[in-house]
């Protein structure tokens, strides 16, 4: 276990554990709701990757902006978005983070400096560079933490954004969550170099590659990386992880064996952290179970809240298209 | 297997029908759905369709004869199967055929189809621009008599203007949409017109309704600004022949209000009140010699374009004298709209056994006070007539509130 | 009133807005040291400094993407695309991000970015550098698309675009930069989404915008000499599209010709004609004519290229067909 854990007191450890379990249970519950037909569209689960988001965001400051791709439920929770608002958005309700207009892939919570899940692979990397440019221009202290998958590192946007961020020394922490597959294509079948961090070398960007199943190890790596970013410019952190579920609901998973999945599941980030807390930090099993119970209640509360929330009003159809409400013109029907 | 066709029930208060005309003769083949006969009720002339394909084996009722509903009127079958032993024919049918009761009046059906347009126009369409057509209609000019100077002889604005200056005679063949300024001559004597069956039926029912149903009336001014703009927007996207009328919106809004607030979707039945599961909204349609109510069934579950199309088709059939039983039977609520005649407001008589009827005036631009200032607004005045035996003022007022919500936020009518 | 070129008017608008609002940045290829490939930002780098006039790599995706991001974070970036043909490399950022962020996140996130793009044909630049694909961008709700045809409108509309809370694609026709026109002294804004009658007339309505406005005005002058008075309506914005003045004019003239530089199929003319037929069918006295580019990729050869582009004579011929 990483040594960074010594900085966390017992309350903080329990809070981190709570967060990881909350992300897991919320998603397990949403998988059920999806199968019941209550969640529409795509649903990409973070299960297995929880240590990455929770570990990195445990050292994020409130002024740091966060932006990620479409596998965004866990990132939203770690940014401080309520389970209620996340669940309501999944159900398309007016009380959701995006008023029911974004859905699973487009959660956002600007109050908590969470700038969205974005569903065009790689497209949010330039957005991250631009936000960091704004902060640097205004002399603000915050940095931008940008999560993306290994699949995004083969698209032009990745290279344009990494180049620009290094060229202009923009304060961005680029976090590549390498879960070994871009949808169903293994990294080595899609990327000419299998270590993503090597791509940062091409831009002279400092970088690191760490294991991502131990939350405290991730946390320690993020601390170092963020230190490098603040005041100095970008850093690429490649975190090796694994998603236990399919790419999205309904993935036939022909590209990997169940033996492989089981091998990684034995390395469950929550199990690892729980054993560490019990064995190394002498936290009682009952205390951890209490957190689990609290999470169960929180998840059920979120589901109740979401299910009882109103659908968006019909008028919402015409709202938030432009700054001024869209008023269909009587003569043209055009906004 | 031979099929017996019986006099259909075409209205809840219909007891008998007159067989006006057999469309098919004995020995003729008829496909399922083809017209077999025309029946006149006291409301309308209705076409009876064949329920099965087959050959007409026997016609049991003579033209001009009235028979009670359920009476066998014809037999369909294969050309050579025996039909004499059909149980339905054991009694009654032959009796009715043998004892023909002459129809009260041999006069033509009150809702006879309108005269065909002039043959010349039907065969050779005049080439004219839309503007020229509009101008010709406004000035009662016969386009076929105006020489077009446009490409291919197209009549354009310029030709109409020239015709108006040189005084080409209006033919009067096309009825102008605006009231004519020339009055017809004074008739030499009083004209006596027999009241049609439809006219008589309306009279009987309205007298009964006014005498027996304790009406009360609630009037509300609806803000129609969103309705006007949304309708314009929707219609901008629709072909002309499927454009939505204000009436369509009111029917849909009434249906949703009835679904939300079912107290008015009811009938009095002795000492019980029946609240209907289905919301079937009638629309009063003016036809020659009276009016008919055409019905959109389950209007709360139908989208606006569907409602609009159904009303348009049924109204067309009604005016053409080809109304179907389903078109006019089974309303649970009625909307009567005179807005298209620039009527600001009016009060309608309830159509029993319904509990209420909504009278709708025109959508008009009026000065309104908004935030302390007088500005131009859109208003539509509606009056609800309701049966005090079934409901009362506060309840009806709450229904009107539902209606108002839908009409003032009409985007909800699309959902 | 001063007489300015289209280029000077745009340059003034940018300069004034940068002086007024420190949130305004310019970013793009060669906007700084070079002074802009069309010399629009000449002198800006020295005056405003490299922090506000940012030379970018040749990478349109990240130019518009970073402008979107900076706008999300509260700045008012003006991204310059050297030509609108390169906007296709940034299509995803324009269509999937600039135009969608506000709506998709329920109003929390906005991208009030201005994307300036130089468009149009007629300069022998070959097929990929000569397009007028304005209508493509006007297809997307959430984006505003502005394409002025006079120095006066260019300045007023660009200032309005920079102050707009919405993303605006601002299209400048390359052959208009030398066009001269009266520009008021001092501060003024022109509203986005408002069409304008640029020349009154009673006989026919010519609907147009951008470069074709100038061509249409030439055609109208020639027609006047043969006694045909054409009214020229300038759309100025393609989205929102203001049909008010078009319909008002058409109801008087009953005849219309729509002139655009882009291709005819699925074009501005198609849209405007459809709306006239929908809204004013009973005022139609002749089929509506469309004048547009031949449906070919523009060739390099000067004569061939000119043969493919719509010209004043085409408009005159179309007007003669309808009056």
Image: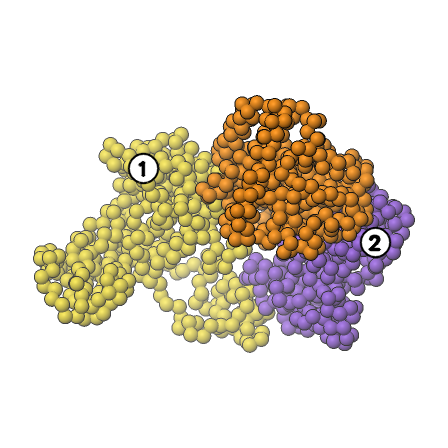
Chain colours: A orange, B yellow, C purple
- Place residue C119 in its image quadrant: bottom right
Name the subunit of mark 2: C
Which of labels 1 and 2 is toward the front? 2
Name the subunit of mark 1: B
Residue B8 in the image, given as x and y percentages of width and height: 22, 54
For mark 2, give the secondary structure: loop
* Residue C171 left/right relative to B306: right
Instruction: State the separation of the CA atoms marked 1 and 2.
Output: 74 Å
For mark 1, give the secondary structure: strand
Residue A197 in the image, given as x and y percentages of width and height: 72, 47
What residue is rendered at 59% in x and 68% in y?
C286
Residue identified by numbered label 2: C31
What residue is rendered at 67% in x and 24% in y?
A9
Mark 1 packing: few (<14 Cα in 10 Å), some, or many (20+)? Answer: some
Compared to residue A259, the image places residue B260 above or below, namely above
- Place residue C170 in its image quadrant: bottom right
* Residue A91 left/right relative to A230: left
Compared to residue B152, the image places residue B214 above or below, namely above
């Amino acid at each position: 276990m990483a040594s960074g854990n010594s900085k966390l007191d017992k309350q903080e450890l329990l809070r981190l554990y709570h967060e990881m379990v909350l992300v897991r249970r919320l998603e397990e519950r949403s998988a059920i709701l999806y199968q019941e037909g209550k969640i529409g569209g795509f649903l990409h689960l973070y299960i297995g990757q929880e240590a990455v988001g929770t570990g990195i965001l445990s050292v994020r400051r409130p002024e740091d902006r966060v932006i990620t791709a479409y596998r965004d439920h866990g990132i939203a929770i770690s940014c401080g978005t309520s389970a209620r608002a996340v669940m309501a958005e999944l159900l398309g309700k007016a009380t959701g983070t995006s008023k029911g207009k974004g859905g699973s892939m487009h959660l956002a919570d600007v109050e908590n400096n969470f700038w969205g899940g974005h569903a065009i692979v790689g497209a949010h990397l330039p957005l991250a560079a631009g936000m960091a440019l704004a902060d640097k221009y205004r002399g603000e202290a915050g940095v931008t933490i940008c999560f993306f998958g290994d699949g995004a590192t083969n698209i032009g946007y990745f290279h344009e954004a990494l180049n620009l961020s290094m060229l202009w020394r923009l304060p961005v922490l680029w976090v590549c969550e390498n879960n070994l597959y871009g949808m169903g294509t293994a990294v080595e079948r899609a990327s000419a170099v299998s270590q993503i961090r090597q791509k940062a070398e091409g831009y002279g960007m400092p970088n690191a590659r760490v294991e991502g199943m131990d939350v405290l190890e991730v946390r320690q790596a993020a601390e170092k990386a963020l230190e490098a970013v603040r005041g100095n410019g970008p850093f690429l952190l490649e975190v090796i992880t694994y998603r236990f579920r399919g790419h999205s609901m309904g993935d036939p998973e022909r590209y990997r064996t169940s033996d492989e999945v089981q091998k990684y599941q034995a390395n469950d980030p929550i199990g690892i952290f729980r054993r560490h807390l019990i064995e190394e930090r002498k936290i009682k099993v009952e205390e951890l179970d209490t957190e689990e119970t609290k999470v169960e209640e929180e998840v059920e509360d979120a589901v109740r809240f979401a299910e009882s929330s109103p659908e968006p009003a019909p008028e919402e159809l015409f709202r938030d298209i432009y700054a001024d409400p869209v008023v269909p013109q009587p003569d043209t029907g055009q906004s | 297997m031979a099929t017996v066709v019986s006099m259909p029930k075409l209205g809840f208060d219909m007891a008998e029908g007159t067989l006006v005309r057999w469309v098919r003769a004995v020995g003729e083949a008829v496909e399922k759905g083809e017209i077999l006969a025309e029946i006149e009720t006291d409301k309308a002339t209705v076409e009876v369709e064949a329920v099965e394909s087959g050959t007409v084996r026997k016609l049991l009722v003579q033209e001009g004869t009235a028979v009670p509903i359920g009476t066998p009127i014809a037999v369909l079958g294969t050309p050579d199967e025996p039909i004499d032993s059909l149980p339905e024919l054991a009694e009654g049918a032959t009796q009715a055929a043998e004892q023909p009761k002459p129809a009260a009046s041999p006069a033509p059906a009150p809702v006879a189809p309108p005269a065909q347009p002039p043959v010349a126009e039907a065969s050779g369409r005049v080439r004219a621009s839309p503007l020229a057509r509009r101008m010709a209609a406004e000035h009662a000019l016969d386009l076929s008599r105006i020489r077009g100077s446009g490409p291919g002889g197209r009549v354009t604005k310029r030709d109409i203007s020239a015709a108006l200056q040189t005084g080409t005679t209006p033919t009067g063949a096309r009825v102008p949409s605006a009231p004519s300024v020339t009055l017809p001559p004074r008739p030499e004597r009083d004209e006596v017109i027999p009241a049609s069956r439809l006219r008589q039926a309306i009279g009987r029912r309205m007298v009964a309704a006014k005498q027996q149903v304790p009406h009360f009336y609630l009037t509300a001014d609806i803000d129609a600004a969103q309705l006007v703009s949304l309708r314009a927007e929707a219609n901008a996207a629709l072909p002309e022949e499927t454009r939505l009328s204000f009436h369509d919106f009111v029917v849909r809004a009434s249906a949703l209000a009835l679904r939300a607030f079912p107290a008015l979707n009811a009938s009095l039945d002795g000492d019980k009140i029946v609240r209907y599961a289905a919301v079937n909204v009638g629309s009063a349609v003016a036809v020659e010699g009276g009016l008919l109510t055409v019905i959109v069934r389950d209007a709360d579950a139908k989208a606006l374009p569907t409602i609009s199309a159904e009303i348009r088709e049924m109204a067309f059939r009604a005016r053409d004298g080809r109304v179907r039983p389903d078109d006019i039977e089974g309303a649970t609520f009625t909307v009567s709209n005179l807005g298209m005649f620039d009527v600001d407001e009016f009060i309608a008589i309830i159509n029993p056994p319904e509990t209420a009827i909504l009278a709708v005036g025109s959508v008009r631009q009026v000065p309104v006070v908004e935030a302390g200032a007088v500005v131009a607004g859109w208003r539509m005045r509606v009056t609800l007539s309701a049966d005090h035996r079934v409901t009362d003022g506060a309840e009806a007022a709450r229904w009107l509130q539902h209606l108002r919500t839908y009409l003032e936020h009409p985007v909800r009518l699309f959902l | 009133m001063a007489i300015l070129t289209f280029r000077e008017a745009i340059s003034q608008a940018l300069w004034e807005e940068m002086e007024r609002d420190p949130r305004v940045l310019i970013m793009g290829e060669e906007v700084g040291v070079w002074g802009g490939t069309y010399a629009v930002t000449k002198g800006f780098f020295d005056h405003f400094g490299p922090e506000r006039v940012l030379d970018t790599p040749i990478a349109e995706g990240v130019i518009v993407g970073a402008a979107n991001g900076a706008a999300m974070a509260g700045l008012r970036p003006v991204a310059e695309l050297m030509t609108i043909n390169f906007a296709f490399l940034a299509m995803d950022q324009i269509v999937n991000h600039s135009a969608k962020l506000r709506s998709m996140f329920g109003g929390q996130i906005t991208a009030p970015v201005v994307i300036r793009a130089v468009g149009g044909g007629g300069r022998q630049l070959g097929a990929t550098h000569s397009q007028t694909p304005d209508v493509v961008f006007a297809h997307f709700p959430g984006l505003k698309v502005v394409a002025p045809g006079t120095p006066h409108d260019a300045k007023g509309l660009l200032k309005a675009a920079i102050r707009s809370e919405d993303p605006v694609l601002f299209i400048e026709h390359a052959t208009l930069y030398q066009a001269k026109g009266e520009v008021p002294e001092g501060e003024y804004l022109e509203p986005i989404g408002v069409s304008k009658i640029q020349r009154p007339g009673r006989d026919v309505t010519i609907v147009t915008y951008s470069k074709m406005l100038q061509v249409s005005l030439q055609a109208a002058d020639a027609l006047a000499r043969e006694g045909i008075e054409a009214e020229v309506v300038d759309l100025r914005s393609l989205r929102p599209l203001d049909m008010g003045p078009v319909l008002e004019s058409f109801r008087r003239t009953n005849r219309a010709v729509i002139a655009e530089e882009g291709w005819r199929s699925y074009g501005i003319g198609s849209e405007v004609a459809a709306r006239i037929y929908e809204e004013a069918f009973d005022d139609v006295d002749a089929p509506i004519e469309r004048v547009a580019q031949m449906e070919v990729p523009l060739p390099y050869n000067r004569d061939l290229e000119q043969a493919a582009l719509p010209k004043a004579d085409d408009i005159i011929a179309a007007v003669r067909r309808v009056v």
